[in-house]
Image (cartoon, helix red, strand yellow):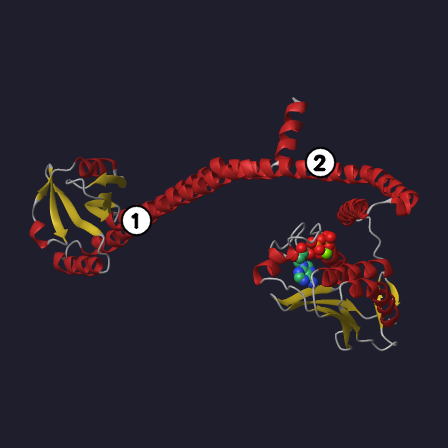
Amino acid sequence: MNKFFSRIFEFIRTYPGVFYSIFLIIFLPLLLFWNTFFIVSKFEKISNEILQTKALFLENTISIFASELLDQPNLLQEKIEKLLQVNPEVKYLRIVKKEGEDFKILNSFKREEIGAVLDDPALVFSWSQNQNIASLIFSPDKSERLWKIVSPVFRNGEKVALISLSLSLKKTDQLIEQSVFNAFFITILGTLVSLFLVFQHTTLFGYVILSQKLKEIDRAKDEFLRMATHELQSPIANIRGYLAELKERLGERLSPQEKEDFEKVEISSRNLVNLIEDLLEVSRIEEGRLDFTPTKLNLEKELSQLILEFERRAKEKNLELYFERPSPEIFIKANPFRFREIMTNLLENAIKYTFKGFVKVATKVDQIKKKCYIFVIDTGIGISAQAQKKLFQKFFREKKRETAGIHGTGLGLWITKEIVEKMGGEIFVESIEGQGSKFIVSLPLFSQR
Ligand SMILES: Nc1ncnc2c1ncn2[C@@H]1O[C@H](COP(=O)(O)OP(=O)(O)OP(=O)(O)O)[C@@H](O)[C@H]1O
Ligand SMILES: [Mg+2]
């Protein structure tokens, strides 16, 4: 039994949406119905009681002046009529006297009734038992409910007449009917809405379970990728090692064609190494294994070193590499290895995707925001507005004629953005297709505090 409950508990914990739906299906409509019933029945009971009290109160009032004014029927009649002007729910009000075996109407707010004889068992009962009778009845045409009250009138301890009074519950009943209608309308509407939500929700069950499974698959895939790339590292290093050795040993004996083939193998193996390194870097970032500990970095020094490394590559492509040297007093707060990674990715891209013109690195400092902006500008192929939206996504590469022969994994900018943001910075791109691109990286300035 315990196992059963712990399983249910586990299920609810894993899929709280299911529990929520069950609540919606069963409890919400029940709750609404119960609430409506409760309110309506309470309302009906209270309004019945109020009217009964009112009827008794009226009957009491009339009984007092009826006993005093029984001998002055005109005055009594006047009083009754006045009383009824302010109590429109009174159906009839009669002062009745027993004459022989009959009950004759002495006063009534319907003057034409005066003198008529009544045949009513309630009168007989009340007269013989000296009792007040209060009963809930229907009007003869069954169209409304009435409170009927009959009570004896005493004078000097002697029974002299009966008061027969009836109060209509029509207004209250109409009000109850309206409330019942409103309440049930809302209940049904609420139930329909909750059923609709449940329906939506049940389709969501599938998604919940699916997304859970997808997450597991994704985790397994990441794990597999990480292992595979890790395992690929040493064989590819061996291949590259043997390749270099072989090339050196064969040296000048190689024909120009063979040299070209060697070059191709070399490039392919380097691309493979780049891919492995990128993939490993992605998994390091995702698993939080990358060190971001910031230090005080001299911007001018760091950038100068990088520019030196890229000068040769730019020259190979006949590109100018400009560097607008920042003031040597500027220090940024960043991890040196991660900073190099950012700049390397951006400079590599700028050179890779530029065929003529220049690549430029410039900086700007915002002392108020305590930020430093680094610009990597090129006059390359540029990036379309559509591609700019997806530029920082994993594996995104813009497929177009100009990029057809350029090798890459599409991970560089994703890695760059992750690193920049983890170091408290931001990265943006501005580009016009066919004219060039400008990547802007902001990083915090180093402050003593
Ligand atoms: N300076 C640039 N000029 C034009 N296009 C660029 C530039 N930088 C990036 N791109 C476009 O953005 C895409 C993604 O760049 P990213 O650096 O992420 O990947 P990659 O360069 O293709 O591969 P790698 O992971 O090896 O860097 C590129 O494929 C290219 O289409
Ligand atoms: Mg790149």
Residue sitting nearer the eye, 164 or 338: 338
Q: Quadrant of ligand 2?
A: bottom right
Q: Residue at x 15, y 40 (%)?
A: 140
Residue 165 position within the rendered picture, expressed as x and y whole percent measured from the top left: 21, 47
Q: Residue at x 67, y 39 (%)?
A: 218
Q: What mark, if any, has residue 220 been given in the picture? A: 2
Circle 2 packing at 10 Å, graded few (<14), some (14-19), many (20+), is few
The amino acid on which the numbered mark 1 sits, given as a three-letter code, is Gln
Residue 217 position within the rendered picture, expressed as x and y whole percent measured from the top left: 67, 36
Q: Secondary structure at mark 1?
A: helix
Residue sitting nearer the eye, 85 or 269: 269
Q: Residue at x 78, y 65 (%)?
A: 314
Tell me: 390 left or right of 231.
Answer: left
Q: Residue at x 72, y 59 (%)?
A: 352
Residue 361 position within the rendered picture, expressed as x and y whole percent measured from the top left: 77, 70
Query: Which label sits in the foreground, 2 or 1?
Result: 2
Q: Earlier in the sequence, mark 2 or mark 1?
A: 1
Circle 1 packing at 10 Å, graded few (<14), some (14-19), many (20+), is few
